[in-house]
Amino acid sequence: MIAELGALGALAAAGASARWNWWRPAIDGGMPALMYHKIGEAPPGSRLKKLWVTAADFRGQLQYLKDHGYAAITFSDWRDAEKGLKPLPAKPVLITFDDGYQNNYETAFPLLREFGMKGNVFLVYETMDQYNAWHDPDTEPWTRMLTWSQIKEMQDGGTFEFGSHTMKHRCLTEIPLEEARWELTESKKRLEDKLGRECVGFAYPYGAGAYAPDVRRAALDAGYRFDFGIRQGITRLPWRREDGPIQRLLVRGDDNALDFHLNLTRGKARF
Ligand SMILES: [Zn+2]
């Protein structure tokens, strides 16, 4: 309650209006899945600045999670809970990163370790050790992707788990279904070979295909246990596949503390 009042104080301080969802009733429980991309300062020329979250903001968000009793889990923690092998913590949260940027290793990894939290990264298999070459460099300057030795180090300490974000980051609704199937099955198989663990989670590039029944069917047929879309919200527990892809909470570079609080408690910060 005190935290709630604090956040509402922040609302007043922000000079906020009804554009924020503070008046919505808080959602009890569920599986909040935060969606990050790059941690650090946006490079000059980036037109995707909102997908860069500074280290200071990321640290503040981890502090919020800690102060509010959240326990960060991995995909396989959730899988094991579904199998009845161990219970979920009282307030679970999934911290997810799309694409697999090297700044996840350089900046997010030490911060997660400092807070004793876990993260999950969706890798684009063929770009590892290289650059985010699917971006037009006029829109987003190329930046280094994780190397395999970094990925192994992140996994070995138990801080990170890795899911698939396809082979090439193509839009799965704009290629023939057979090619989409290959993107889904090949990336899962290669990641499992490389990392020696079940590849449990999948995120659709651009969110494309998450809401196209044939592509989603192909993702589930490929054997992924959890598929993540990009619709904003908190998925209720227990989640069933028929409920649709797991919703996420996009953390934007220009979000303030109130946005973060409302995302986690209301499923959406603003209209
Ligand atoms: Zn992506």
Image (spheres, rainbow, N blue to C red):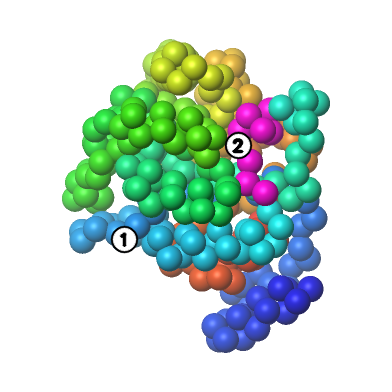
Count up the numbered dots: 2
Q: Can you identify the residue that label 2 sits on?
A: 74
Label 1's element? loop
Residue 174 appears anywhere in the view: no
Is residue 42 one of those drawn in magenta?
no
Q: Position of residue 61 (x, y in %)?
A: 54, 62
Residue type of the residue flagged with mark 1? Glu
170 or 8: which is nearer to us?
Answer: 8
Residue 76 appears anywhere in the view: yes
What residue sits 25% from the left and 50% below the top?
140
Q: Is residue 99 left or right of residue 227?
A: left
Report the Cα–Cα distance between label 2 and label 1. Answer: 26 Å
Label 2's element? loop
211 or 3: which is nearer to us?
Answer: 3
Q: Residues within 10 Å of mark 1 (few under 14, many from 20)?
A: few
Q: Residues within 10 Å of mark 2 (few under 14, many from 20)?
A: many
Q: Position of residue 143 (x, y in %)?
A: 25, 45
Vertical position of residue 236 compared to residue 162: above or below: below
Q: Report the span colored magenta.
A: 71-79
Residue type of the residue flagged with mark 2? Thr
What residue sits 31% from the left and 32% below the top?
147
Q: Residue 41 shows which numbered tag?
A: 1
Mark 1 and mark 2 in contact (Cβ < 8 Å)?
no
Q: Earlier in the sequence, mark 2 or mark 1?
A: 1
Q: Position of residue 2 (x, y in %)?
A: 75, 76
